[in-house]
Image: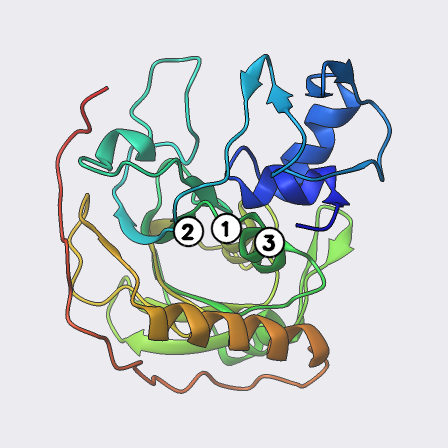
Amino acid sequence: MPEERLQKILSRAGAASRRKAEQLILEGRVAVNGALVVEMGSKADLDRDHIRVDGKLLHTPKRLAYIALHKPNNCVTTVTDPEGRPTVMDLLRGVKERVYPVGRLDYHSEGLLLLTNDGDLANAITSAATHLPKTYLVKINGTLTAQQEQAFREGLPIQGRRTAPAGLRLAHRAANPWYEVRLFEGRKNQIRLMFKHSGRLVEKLKRVKIGPLDLGSLKPGEFRYLSLAEVEQLRKAVRHSAVKHVGVKHTAVKHTAVKHTAVKHVSSGPRKR
């Protein structure tokens, strides 16, 4: 195997995401053939070289795994939590691959979360340059005016920076209505802050799509492995989104559903550690 950049090897082997791998290198936690590597751009060959992360020998993963999880409320999107709160990793009962969450969902939010040991795909999905759309169903405490809806679509000044154009559609009319929101960026607490800017509070927030990947019939705490077709569809969506700049004015979000393959290996419940 030809030499590759060290951070790419780490992410491909499932040791960390590409961004986290760079941090590990800079912190002096990666060694190649017994020598610490602290410079970016260093290359190695996983088949030939002995690469260790925090003293543990790195192995090529037996297979890449892609998992769709319905993250429940009151659960953190991290591998561990210093406060002892439940994490999404506790839900992956029977999963042998060492996978990591792609992006995040807030503690009080639920919905679709992708976990994988494919560092390249994870990095592409979370990259600010990709603009892969993510769709949410949001319940708020009151209906927006037409002017507020249009401002939401065009972008709002949040924490000193205007948000990118977003899709917005009234999904269910009620005193406390549900809106379908489509974002092309992933700033922390963005949806909650955007509605707060319009004088509304988010009561419930559920992510239902990541690009073409749909939450489907998964219940909170359940997960399933993606099919090869779904993985390829996701890769194509990432490539397409990366070259298509989001400069189009979004006036509505059409409610289109992605056809799912049969749910296989659906599981729920705490993971044994």
For marks 3 and 2, give the CA distance: 11 Å
Disc 1 + disc 3, Cβ < 8 Å: yes
For marks 1 and 3, give the CA distance: 6 Å
Residue 46: x %, y % from top left = 63, 37
The part of the image, by quadrant, that contains residue 53 is top right
Mark 3 residue element: helix
Q: Is residue 144 visible?
A: no
Q: Which residue is mark 1?
A: 118
Q: Amino acid at mark 2?
A: Leu
Q: Which residue is mark 3?
A: 120
For marks 2 and 1, give the CA distance: 6 Å
242 or 226: nearer the viewer:
226
131 or 67: nearer the viewer:
67
Disc 2 + disc 1, Cβ < 8 Å: yes
Mark 2 residue element: loop
Residue 179: x %, y % from top left = 37, 69
Q: Amino acid at mark 3?
A: Asp
The part of the image, by quadrant, that contains residue 72 is top left
